Image (cartoon, rainbow, N blue to C red):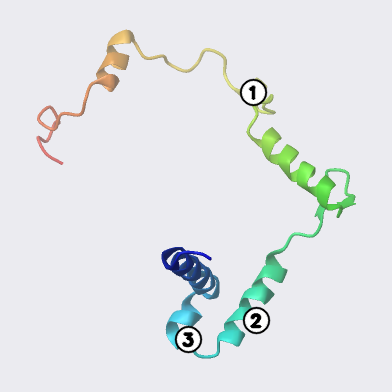
Amino acid sequence: MFPPISLWYTLRSVCTKWFQRARENWVKFGERNTSYFHHQVNIRRRRNKIEALRDANGTWIDDLNILASFVFEYYANLYTQDESPYEDKLPKGAFPCLTQNEMMMLLRPFNIIGHPQGHL
């Protein structure tokens, strides 16, 4: 059998989960009409569930395993560096570079005394 403290924490986490899922309605109405709040959470869960996505070719993906790998690949590719379509339109060498002294000045700790107005 579970120790009472563990059971209490489990019960509290379940209550907290439902409290957060039903959001402000639970705060407004308290413990009354609990079945209503469970129903609201289930409706929201069904509405937010992603059952299918369309790929780049326009075909729908509804198989759960293929859908999971599709989403994984999408986010894995989202944060990789690729060639920008605007890269050739950027001016080459037109941007000024910082000197070594300017870089060192930016790395110094902030000092309010050295600020032009003396304060912020």
Q: Nearer the viewer, mark 3 or mark 2?
A: 3
Viewer-nearest of discs 2 and 1? 2
Please state the horizontal and vertical placement of residue 71, each as a whole percent of the image.
Answer: 74, 45
Q: Please name the residue that numbered disc 3 is placed on.
A: 31
Amino acid type, callout 1: Glu
Amino acid found under the numbered disc labelled 2:
His
Q: Which residue is mark 2?
A: 39
Task: Locate residue 19 relative to residue 71 in the image: left or right.
Answer: left
Separation of marks 3 and 2 at Cα, in angstroms: 14 Å
Residue 87 badge? 1
Q: Residue furthest front?
A: 1
Is residue 54 something one can see in this rendering? no
Marked residue nearer the N-terminal end (3 or 1)? 3
Q: Determine the CA span between mark 3 and mark 1.
A: 59 Å
Single out the residue that lies furthest toward the top: 100
Mark 3 residue element: loop
Q: Residues within 10 Å of mark 2 (few under 14, many from 20)?
A: few
